[in-house]
């Protein structure tokens, strides 16, 4: 496993980090494709977040915690799915959803576990680094010393599954420059619609 701190392996089981996953050319290509995606402000229970999103493949509805089939994943992102698939040895067909997110200057993503219908999460970061944080989901295990905070660099890939996905939650600290992420998700077997 390639991690930023290979000698320390600070991550919970099921979290992997791969710096320099994209080439600079691939990052630029994807950035220009993202600019063509019609993003909308993320809202949750009536509150508007600063970040803007669009999903393909499946759409997750936060209020009902359910998914419906979405628009097809655009052709220009397929090479990315193939690259991730090869890198982590998960078949292309398993990647059911692509979420495109723009984090404007000063935006965050607060502590959360990923949406229940999804299983493996693969996150690709573009245009700037961010500070990513993990902490136990169980409130009794939370505390200052339980937070793992580390840089997630532009052009990197992280993968969350297993314990890191189910027993930990994650957040991203305020971004200092506009960040984009492409999140690929597989579906839990029981959630296929
Ligand atoms: O932008 C990222 O890398 C994290 C995305 C995320 O956690 C989410 O959309 O739930």
Image: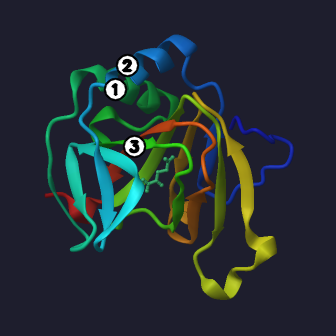
Q: Position of residue 92 (x, y in %)?
A: 32, 33
Q: Secondary structure at mark 3?
A: strand
> Which residue is painted at 43% across and 52% down in the image?
120
Q: Residue furthest bottom?
A: 140
> Which residue is painted at 80% across and 40% down in the image?
6
Q: Closer to the N terminus: mark 3 or mark 2?
A: 2
Q: Is mark 2 within 8 Å of ligand 1?
A: no
The residue pinned by badge 3 equals 101
Is there CB contact under 8 Å for labels 2 and 1? yes
> Which residue is painted at 48% across and 43% down in the image?
104
> Which residue is painted at 70% across and 35% down in the image?
2
The residue pinned by badge 2 equals 32
Q: Secondary structure at mark 1?
A: loop
The residue pinned by badge 1 equals 35
Is residue 112 toward the left or the right of residue 98 in the image? right
Marks 3 and 2, Cα distance to the nearest angstrom? 14 Å
Is residue 177 toward the left or the right of residue 148 in the image? left
Q: Nearer the viewer, residue 133 or 43?
A: 43
User: Is the N terminus in the top left, top right, bottom left or bottom right quadrant?
Assistant: top right
Is there CB contact under 8 Å for labels 3 and 1? no
Q: Is mark 3 within 8 Å of ligand 1?
A: yes
Q: Position of residue 22 (x, y in %)?
A: 54, 22
Instruction: Please say if 37 is above or below 60.
Output: above
């Amino acid at each position: 496993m390639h991690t930023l701190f290979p000698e320390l392996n600070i991550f919970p089981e099921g979290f992997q980090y791969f710096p320099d996953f994209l080439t600079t050319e691939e990052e630029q290509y994807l950035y220009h494709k993202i600019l063509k995606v019609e993003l909308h402000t993320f809202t949750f229970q009536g509150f508007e977040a600063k970040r803007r999103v669009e999903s393909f493949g499946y759409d997750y509805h936060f209020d009902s915690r359910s998914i419906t089939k979405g628009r097809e994943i655009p052709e220009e992102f397929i090479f990315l799915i193939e690259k991730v698939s090869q890198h982590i040895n998960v078949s292309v067909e398993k990647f059911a959803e692509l979420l495109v997110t723009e984090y404007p200057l000063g935006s965050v993503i607060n502590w959360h576990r990923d949406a229940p219908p999804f299983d493996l999460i693969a996150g690709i970061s573009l245009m700037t680094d961010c500070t990513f944080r993990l902490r136990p989901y169980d409130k009794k295990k939370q505390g200052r010393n339980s937070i793992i905070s580390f840089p997630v660099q532009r052009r990197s890939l992280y993968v969350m599954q297993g314990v890191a996905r189910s027993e930990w939650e994650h957040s991203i600290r305020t971004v200092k420059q506009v960040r984009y992420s492409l999140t690929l998700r597989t579906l839990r077997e029981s959630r296929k619609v």
